[in-house]
């Protein structure tokens, strides 16, 4: 596999899981965020997860050490100049992502793939900020990224076949199953999943059933491994609201409007697992 060093930008929920997944497959990772402090917290989280895997006998202490050694925190792009693949997983905001891709395009030679983990933004629009849109594509992981098998590969208007093939092979190398999808709001999974979460929250808002009943019903009645409200806590309530607003705006249909309960929870910082409070307490 020709990809040896990957720069992961954004060390939040997803960046943390992606860095973990890559390191587990012995890929060297440069981890970057707005501050070194944030990246350190992500590394601590990975350390804790690995500690649990050691405790449960899944891996040895030596395996844990080998994985952790693969991740190096960097404070800026220049410190990761020899990366041969970049995965962006920062805040879901088009202008912030475009600014970053502009800098990435200047910093890395044109054969370095620039992949975005965006959940709902247009890859073609992100790529517009670069001089080499052919090397920009979506590489959409699922939470928790070190466990979930799926990666959606999103082909922007100008993404080259070569870029798609590189991402596909790399995804397989790190143990994922890739599916290709056109650049369209929400791609496959979020276009189907997030409106379902919205509907579940709406049911709760209308007091038609309690949260446990809604989650149990969807687990046992639809064969889902986790209920929609528990899943919303895992994804992040703010991320769900953001995706719904993007779907509504970009598909021009009010059926995607986030329900009041989700909006209120986002406003009150009840964002799910990452803040300790969401539909459930953690
Ligand atoms: P998060 O809020 O947990 O983490 C985002 C991180 O990006 C933060 O640590 C923030 O400090 C950092 N950041 C913001 N601007 C930056 C910049 N200019 N340079 C460097 N770092 C910057 O968000 P999360 O959930 O990890 O989402 C990240 C991306 O992944 C978003 O595009 C989201 O749509 C996508 N995504 C999220 C999933 C989820 O389940 N949470 C699933 C799949 C994709």
Image: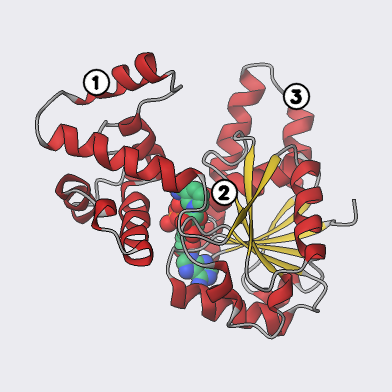
Task: Name the residue beneath numbered marker 1.
Answer: 212
Residue 167 drawn at (x, y percent): 75, 55
Residue 222 versus residue 148: which sits nearer the camera? Answer: 222
Helix, strand or loop at label 3? It is loop
Give the mark nearer the N terminus: 3 vs 2.
2
Q: Quadrant of residue 46?
A: top right
Horizontal relation, residue 223 to residue 26: left or right: left
Task: Decide: is 52 above or below 242.
Answer: above
In this rendering, which labeled residue sits more in front, label 2 or label 1?
A: 1
In space, the residues marked 1 and 3 are separated at their CA atoms by: 37 Å
Q: Residues within 10 Å of mark 1 (few under 14, many from 20)?
A: some
Residue 113 versus residue 195: which sits nearer the camera? Answer: 195
Residue 251 versus residue 98: which sits nearer the camera? Answer: 251
Would you say the beta carbon of the disc 2 residue lies within 8 angstroms of ligand 1? Answer: yes
Task: Decide: is 87 above or below 188.
Answer: below
Give the mark nearer the N terminus: 2 vs 1.
2
Q: Residue at x 70, y 39 (%)?
A: 176
Horizontal relation, residue 213 to residue 230: left or right: left
Q: Residues within 10 Å of mark 2 (few under 14, many from 20)?
A: many
In space, the residues marked 2 and 1 are separated at their CA atoms by: 29 Å
Give the mark nearer the N terminus: 1 vs 3.
3
Horizontal relation, residue 120 to residue 112: left or right: left
Task: Name the residue beneath numbered marker 3.
Answer: 60
Mark number displayed over residue 45: none
Q: Residues within 10 Å of mark 3 (few under 14, many from 20)?
A: some
Residue 82 visible in rendering: yes
Horizontal relation, residue 62 to residue 256: left or right: right
Helix, strand or loop at label 2? It is helix
In space, the residues marked 3 and 2 are separated at their CA atoms by: 21 Å
Task: Decide: is 237 above or below 76.
Answer: above
């Amino acid at each position: 596999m020709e990809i040896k060093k990957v720069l992961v930008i954004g060390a939040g929920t997803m960046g943390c899981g992606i860095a973990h997944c890559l390191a587990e497959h012995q890929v060297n990772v440069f981890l970057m965020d707005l501050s070194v402090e944030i990246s350190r917290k992500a590394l601590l989280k990975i350390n804790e997860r690995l500690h649990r895997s050691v405790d449960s006998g899944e891996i040895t202490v030596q395996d844990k050490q080998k994985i952790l050694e693969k991740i190096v925190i960097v404070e800026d792009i220049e410190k990761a100049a020899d990366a041969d693949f970049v995965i962006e997983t920062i805040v879901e905001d088009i202008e912030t992502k475009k600014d970053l891709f502009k800098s990435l395009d200047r910093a890395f030679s044109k054969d370095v793939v620039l992949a975005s983990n965006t959940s709902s933004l247009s890859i073609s629009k992100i790529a517009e900020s670069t001089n080499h849109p052919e090397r920009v594509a979506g590489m959409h992981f699922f939470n928790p990224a070190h466990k979930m098998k799926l990666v959606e590969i999103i082909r922007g208007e100008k993404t080259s076949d070569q870029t798609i093939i590189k991402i596909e092979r790399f995804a397989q190398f790190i143990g994922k199953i890739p599916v290709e999808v056109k650049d369209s709001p929400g791609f496959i999974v979020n276009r189907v999943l997030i409106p379902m979460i919205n509907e579940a929250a709406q049911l709760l808002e209308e007091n038609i059933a309690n949260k446990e009943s809604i989650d149990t019903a969807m687990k046992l009645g639809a064969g889902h491994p986790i209920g929609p409200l528990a899943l919303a806590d895992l994804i992040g309530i703010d991320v769900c609201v953001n995706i719904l607003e993007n779907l509504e705006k970009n598909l021009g249909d009010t059926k995607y409007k986030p329900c009041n309960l989700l909006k209120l929870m986002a406003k009150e910082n009840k964002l799910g697992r990452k803040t300790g409070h969401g539909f459930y307490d953690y």
